[in-house]
Image: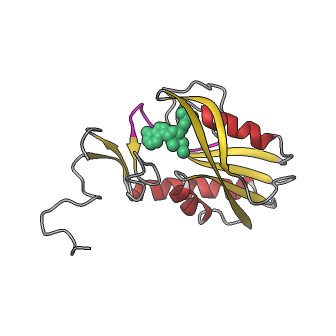
Amino acid sequence: MTAGPAQGETTEFTNPNLELMYSADEIAERVRELGAQITAEYAGNELVLVGVLKGSCVFLADLMRAIDLPITIDFMSVSSYKDGTQSTGDVEILKDLSNPIRDKDVIVVEDIVDTGLTLTRLLEILGSRGARSIRLASLLDKPEPRIKKELKIDYTGFVIPNKFVVGFGLDVAGRYRNLPFIGVVKDPDKA
Ligand code: IMP
Ligand code: MG
């Protein structure tokens, strides 16, 4: 361990290779709105938030604190099989839910919907387990590469252009999940 950055040096959060897309304040405001909407729509029901690991963890942590209802949370981890860089839609469950969702109202919480292949398969798997309802919340919606056009996102934070974004849970090779904002990596070959 060394001491912190010297004056004038850039840090992970001030990395000049990142271009700001949504600030922490903008995200907080939007998450508050989504939480208020979910609170109003689910009043009187037993709501389970299912976070899809790992990308959803930051959004889930904020969203759950914006929902003023008795809720529980659970997690799933899936890996999508890739054919080159394109996901094939086949998913392997690496970690399943800890509790049954039978007769529960479920909201699956994701970081971003891109092609929609992974989530479509995940929703099919969860759809066979007798939940009362299953909806989808995603912090980001990147509709341009969407293959599963029929996939419905019930609660969307922001609709974004076809750019690779990081921060607020989103990563490139595991890095940048801790950024408090959402940014675009300007040059993917640079750190
Ligand atoms: P898809 O919808 O099956 O293509 O897979 C979506 C997954 O790809 C997301 O859950 C992310 O893990 C990842 N992903 C897609 N676009 C981005 C991005 O712009 N930044 C970081 N991860 C992304
Ligand atoms: Mg993900």
Q: Quadrant of the N terminus?
A: bottom left
Place residue 81 in its image quadrant: top right
Front position in the image: 104 or 74? 74
Displayed quadrant of residue 44:
bottom right
Question: Which residue does the image show at 74% across and 67% down from the upper left?
Answer: 70
Q: Hey, which quadrant is residue 116 in on the image?
A: top right
Q: Seen in the image, is 32 located left or right of residue 186?
A: right
Q: Is residue 113 magenta?
A: no
In front of the other: 62 or 79: 79
Q: Is residue 136 visible?
A: yes
Name the spot of residue 89 as percent of width and height, x first. 63, 30
Q: Is residue 157 visible?
A: no
* 142 left or right of 39 in image: left
* Numbered range of the magenta stretch: 154-164
Q: Nearer the viewer, residue 79 or 178?
A: 79
The location of residue 10, given as percent across then percent down, is: 19, 59
Q: Is residue 3 above or below residue 173?
A: below
